[in-house]
């Protein structure tokens, strides 16, 4: 099987990981990395025995590529993606797709005009716990979904200066909520604070109401001296609690629904039942993501997470920012 020639533009934290995973994939041939910092580019290139570039235009004009990962700061996504599209290169743009709806639309338009694949790197959709959780929800194992509660906490990332915690960090859970709720968002509300970040918010408490009645809750910040990545989904038949980092998930049963299989909704109760661990086949989410990206190119399939999907998630993030600024509930 012919390997796809790939490169990574932007060798920061995520770019380094993209380069590492591409170097490990059997169907990928990592040929180059690019970063405006010469030392960084040289170090990563030497590590994987590939070419180093310090200007992305030079990379795109010099190499014959099948695909590229765009891992530059969010504010540069548009200019790099539009150039990659002009060179007929399929691209994975790290989340968020862009800092603004205007930029997102320009990226989507450029990819369509060039007829190249565009995928947005919402990596948590490829986390095994979310894959399993989505499957079990679709199978009706929770019945009606009442609430999804997401907790995403972290120390302050010095590298993030162009956007705040909502667009860069909470957007993971906004996308996951959209992915598993299976319904349009009716309204959002946000309370934010700026404690450490020099220009943007670094704390969010947010709520989302979906048209099917599901309530989503976001607890996100860059102020906690410990990484926390957790999600709980509560429904008629119990609750799933999952940890993104350890890729562990438990089910807490509502004993009432098991004993009253014929309940008709006129009467509902909650009784503590047994707790059980859900078996998860653990795998690095980024590896799942990049394999899916390359597969959609090789087999000419639709992008697993399209530009339009990425833009809709960005739109909700922007609505949270609007809500925080206006101190009121906002409708998408």
Image (cartoon, rainbow, N blue to C red):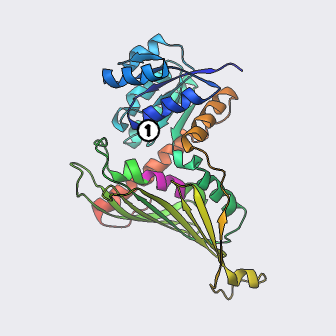
Q: In this view, does 172 lie above or below 108?
A: below
Position of residue 76 in the picture relative to residue 47 (left or right): left
Q: Farthest residue to the bottom: give it.
A: 267
Decide: is 37 above or below 152: above
Q: Which residue lies furthest to the top in this view?
A: 62
Examine the rendering and report whether any part of residue 263 can be seen: no
Q: In which quarter of the image is residue 112?
A: top right
- Give the left or right position of residue 189, taking residue 309 as reference: left
Q: Is the magenta stretch mostly helix, strand or loop?
A: helix
Q: Give the range drawn in magenta.
A: 171-177
Coordinates of residue 219 in the picture (x, y in percent): 40, 64
Say which quadrant the C terminus sits in.
bottom left
- Please indicate whether residue 194 sits to the left or right of residue 178 in the image: left
Q: Quadrant of residue 67?
A: top right
* Residue 309 in the image: above or below residue 242: above
In this view, the residue in front, 232 or 106, is 232
Report if residue 94 is visible in the image: yes
Name the quadrant of the N terminus: top right
Q: Where is residue 160 in the image (x, y as percent from the top left)?
A: 31, 43
Residue drawn at x 33%, y 53% as measured from the top left = 155
User: Residue 72 in the image: x percent, y percent?
Assistant: 38, 32
Q: Could you tell me which residue is drawn at 71 percent across and 81 percent down?
A: 257
Q: Does the magenta stretch include residue 176?
A: yes
Q: Dot 1, how many residues are within 10 Å of its Cα: few (below 14), some (14-19), or many (20+)?
A: many
Q: Is mark 1 on a helix, strand or loop?
A: helix
Rendered residue at 66%/32% (across/down): 295
**Hey, which residue is sitting farthest right in the picture?**
262
Image position, residue 104 (x, y; %): 44, 38
Residue at the spot of label 1: 104
Left/right placement of residue 330 relative to residue 86 reads left
């Amino acid at each position: 099987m012919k390997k796809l020639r790939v490169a990574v533009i932007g060798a920061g934290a995520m770019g380094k990981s993209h380069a590492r995973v591409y170097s490990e994939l059997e169907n990928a041939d990592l040929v180059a990395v690019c970063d405006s910092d010469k030392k960084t580019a040289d170090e990563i290139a030497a590590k994987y025995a590939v070419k180093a570039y310090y200007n992305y235009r030079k990379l795109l004009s010099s190499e014959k590529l099948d695909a590229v990962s765009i891992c530059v700061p969010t504010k540069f996504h548009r200019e790099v993606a539009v150039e990659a599209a002009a060179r007929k290169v399929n691209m994975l743009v790290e989340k968020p797709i862009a800092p603004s709806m205007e930029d997102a639309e320009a990226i989507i338009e450029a990819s369509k005009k060039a007829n190249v694949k565009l995928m947005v790197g919402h990596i948590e959709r490829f986390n095994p716990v979310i894959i399993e959780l989505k499957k079990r929800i679709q199978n009706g194992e929770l019945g009606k979904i009442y609430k999804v509660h997401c907790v995403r906490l972290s120390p302050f990332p010095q590298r993030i200066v162009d956007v705040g915690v909502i667009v860069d960090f909470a957007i993971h859970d906004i996308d996951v909520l959209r992915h598993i709720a299976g319904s349009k968002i009716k309204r959002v509300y946000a309370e934010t604070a700026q404690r450490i970040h020099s220009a943007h918010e670094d704390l969010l408490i947010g709520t989302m109401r979906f048209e099917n009645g599901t309530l989503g809750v976001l607890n996100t910040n860059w102020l906690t001296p410990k990484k926390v990545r957790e999600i709980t989904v509560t429904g008629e038949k119990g609750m799933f609690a999952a940890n993104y980092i350890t890729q562990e998930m438990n089910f807490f049963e509502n004993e009432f629904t098991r004993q009253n299989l014929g309940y008709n909704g006129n009467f509902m109760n909650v009784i503590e039942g047994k707790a059980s661990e859900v078996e998860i086949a653990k795998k690095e989410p980024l590896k799942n993501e990049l394999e899916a990206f390359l597969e959609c190119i090789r087999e000419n399939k639709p992008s697993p997470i399209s530009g339009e999907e990425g833009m809709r998630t960005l739109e909700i993030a922007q609505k949270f920012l609007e809500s925080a600024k206006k101190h009121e509930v906002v409708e998408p």
